Image: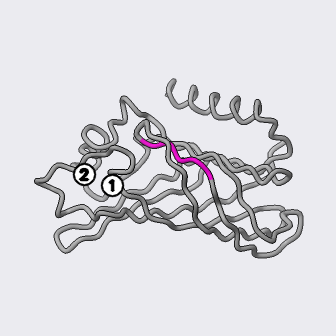
Amino acid sequence: MHLRFSFIFLVITCLSINGFSQNYMTKTGFIGFYSKTSLEDVNAENNQVYAVLDPASHHLAFAVLMKGFIFTKELMQEHFNENYVESDKFPKATFSGTCSGDMDLSKDGTYQVVIKGDLTLHGVTKPVETTAQLEVKKGRIQGNSAFKLKPEDFNIGIPSIVREKIASEISVKVKVELTRSN
C-alpha cells in the first residue's frame, strides 16, 4: 500500500512540476498486452493505469505499475514479474510524449491523432510512435490505441526453452477515459 501511495504521489508531483493545469486525467486506465502463437496465448491486463493529458500543449503522460498486470495463468504472472520485466528492480513503465493532428479537445468530436514520445520499460527508454483515436464527449476524453512492441527492444530476454510460446512482437492495447482535474 505504501508503494502505491508513493507512486501516485510521485506521478502527480512530476506532472505538476511540468506545468500541467486544467488537465484531463485518470487513475483507472487500461493497458493490455497479448501474445498469440500456435503453442500458447499470453494475455495480461492492467486497469490501474495513470494517465494525464494537457489539452493546451497536447502533452500526454502515462505510468503503470508492472505488478498490476493480471494474467490468465498465475504461473505466467509470476514468471513475468520475476524473470522477464523484473518488477522488483523496474517497478513501473512510463510514457511521456505528445499527441498531434487535427483536433480541438474543447469540442465534442472524434479525432484521429498521432502519439509520439518516449516509453521507458525495464529500464530502457525507446521512442514510440503510433496512432490513436480520441473521442471528446460531454467534457470527457476517451482514448484508444493499439501498437506492437518487441521484448528485446527493452532488454527483456526470453529463454530459448519458451521462445516458441511467445510472439516476437507483443500486441499492446491502451484505453483511457480522461476527466478534467481541478
Say which residue appears at 17% left-offset and 63% top-offset: 164
Residue 1 picture location, percent across and down = 49, 28
Is label 1 in contact with label 2 (beta carbons under 8 Å)? Answer: yes
Report the residue at 63% width, 45% height from top. Answer: 96
Disc 2 marks a residue whose amino acid type is Met
Which residue is drawn at the image coordinates 86% and 67% (left, top)? 104
| Gap between marks 1 and 2 measured at Cα | 7 Å
Q: Quadrant of residue 94?
A: top right
Image spot of residue 182 (x, y percent): 84, 42
The front one of 104 and 72 is 104
Residue at numbered disc 1:
71
| Element type at mark 2 | helix
* Secondary structure predominantly adopted by residues drawn in magenta: strand
Residue under pointer 2 = 76
Q: For the magenta stretch, what is the residue range?
A: 117-121
Q: Is residue 159 above or below residue 36?
A: above
